[in-house]
Amino acid sequence: MKLVRYISLLVLVLFASLSYSQSWTGRAFNFYDAKDYDNAKSAIDSAITTYERFDSQTWQLRGLIYGNVSTSDQLYYREIALESFVRAKSLDSTGIYTENINSYLDNTLIRYYNDAVNFLLEEQNFEKSIESYELYKDLYRKLRVAGFEFTTKDINFYNAVGAEFLKKVDLVEPDKKPYFREKALFYCNKVLKIDSLDYMANFNSGIVHYNIGADYVMTAKPETTLEELTMNLKKSEDAFLKAIVPLHRAEKLKPNSLEVQEALMGCYYGLLNNNKYLKYQTLVDKHYIQSYIDQYKADPTDQDNIKKLIRIYTYTLIDEEKADYYKNILFDLKNK
């Protein structure tokens, strides 16, 4: 998801060419041109108390000035900027400034989207991010294009939100994990309602369920009773079964995706489905085999790496001669 940069499209000629030197608008423009936004703001506010308030360009300039004021009240000033551009448009009876005003509106509105991205990726403030994104859409439909379809942006944004919730699962305490997983699934499902064949939403949905299944198995405590263990295994199985549905959909969308193959391998391992587990383990091993061989050449004493090669040549990419070769090497290393 790209953060759209704000680009000022002020057409200086429009203001510079007018005989505004003695007017409040002219003074405001001079301050604006010198980037003295505080004095520009005072001057343009004076302008709208005079006959100059009937000039579209006065309101355009007011919008540009307020859009550039950087204070803790930036959102408040942004609202004033938008109101000014709307007023400028209403005064532009001939439509001569329509294109410019629409550009000013677009570049002001996109700041709400940029805020949403920053809140999400930089500050990890999910609530403010979502609020800012929804405000961006509402204002765009109100001020620019009524009924505008945000399909592509919705997919990109909600996928990003879901992915960030998913990342948080690994960073929080165990008792908080369910909340973040639930949120990740919620935003995956928002995307899937828009496009059921979206790869990322299907993959992330599968990963959420896969991690739930893995947690039931991997986080069992020593004091867990047989009854609790049996229940956890059943919950784990249910989660893996839920995972494979979106993961297989993702596989169809990207048949050679390594991340999907690894996830399905883990699911079928957890489901004790040896045939399908070996199918995906083989695909994964084909991807990594050369790296293991290269590692062996770089460090022939790396026993963990040699064990991987023995496993591969014994169970997936079966080659008895190579398996025996690495078994003998491992035997010699252990007996030195």
Image: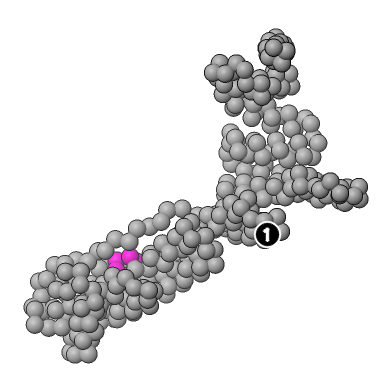
Q: Position of residue 292 (x, y in %)?
A: 60, 22
Residue 228 in magenta?
A: no
Mark 1 neighbour density, 10 Å: few (under 14) some (14–19) many (20 or more):
few
Where residue 47 sits, quadrant-wise, is bottom left
Where residue 52 sits, quadrant-wise, is bottom left
Q: Position of residue 219 (x, y in %)?
A: 76, 47
Q: What kind of residue is marked 1?
A: Lys
Quick one: 235 or 245, which is closer to the camera?
235
Residue drawn at the location 23% of the way across and 73% of the way down: 37
Q: Position of residue 325 (x, y in %)?
A: 68, 10
Q: How is the image coloured?
A: one colour
Q: Position of residue 277 (x, y in %)?
A: 74, 32
What is the span of residues highlighted in magenta in the rendered image?
Answer: 103-107
Quick one: 122 or 193, which is closer to the camera?
122
Which secondary structure lies at badge 1?
A: helix
Q: Is residue 313 above or below residue 199?
A: above
Quick one: 173 or 111, which is closer to the camera?
173
Residue drawn at the location 63% of the way across and 39% of the way down: 260
Q: Is residue 328 above or below residue 205?
A: above
Quick one: 47 or 144, which is closer to the camera?
47
Which residue does the numbered mark 1 point to in the structure image?
Answer: 176
